[in-house]
Image (cartoon, grey):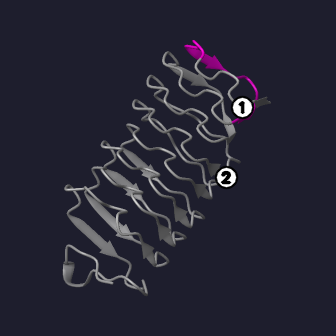
Amino acid sequence: TTIGTRAFYRSGLVGVVARNASLAVGDYAFSELDDLESFIGTVGSLGIGSFSFDPLLTAIKFSDSIDRISRSAFSNDVNLELMELPSSVKYIDENAFRYTKINAVTIPDGVETISAGAFSECSNLEKVDLPKSLVVIEDEAFMGTNLGKLFIPKALVKISDTAFRNISSLTSIEVDADNPVFDSRDDSNAIIE
């Protein structure tokens, strides 16, 4: 089942129950719903801003086949906290979860780039598990989060200048010993390029 572009944009929906096995949600389909508290269903694909600016939405469930979290899909869903990314996800686009209440996330293996602003300003985000496949972290990807420690995997060779900007809580960085670009030897609290 497909929910078209802006199908329920700025409507008064307070809850959605989707009985279909997997929904394809178009651009801004459920965006700017001030009263949307619950979405019960499984999302199989997302358009740009599909659920953005839904201040009361707290949880979302993805199908096991979704491969992309689109640009600004959940941006400014300030109470979104319950979310698990399935192993099928390969792309996390710009600002996908910006300004949400997520406190921990495991990025699935297969994701090579975390796009600009993907988790920026998620002030509750304290823990992120980066996959072995990760190669690039773009600008402001984790800016303004509350991460305490970070493990840099072997394949990660590019961290943009502002990727971890404004994170005073970040006190521990460990780099995989086989990473060809970065180093955190002697228990240093920094990465050396």
Whether residue 153 is visible to the viewer of this picture, yes or no, is no
1 vs 2, front mark? 1
Give the answer, above or below, for where 34 lies relative to 90: above
Instruction: Estimate the spatial distance between the alpha carbons at disc 1 and disc 2, rounded to whole Å.
Output: 19 Å
Front residue of this view, candidates 193 and 110? 193
Label 1: which residue?
A: 5
> Residue 18: x percent and y percent?
70, 23
Q: Amino acid at mark 2?
A: Asp
Could you classify mark 1 by the number of other residues whose Cα lies within 10 Å: few (under 14), some (14-19), or many (20 or more)? some
Quick check: is 17 in the magenta stretch?
yes
Q: Secondary structure at mark 2?
A: loop
Q: Secondary structure at mark 1?
A: loop
Q: Is residue 171 left or right of residue 7?
A: left
Instruction: Please tell me in which quadrant of the rendered image residue 182 appears.
Output: bottom left
Whether residue 33 is visible to the viewer of this picture, yes or no, is yes
Seen at 63% across and 32% down, the residue is 28
Instruction: Identify the image quadrant of the N terminus.
Output: top right
Find the magenta span and give its range.
11-26
Quick check: is 185 in the magenta stretch?
no
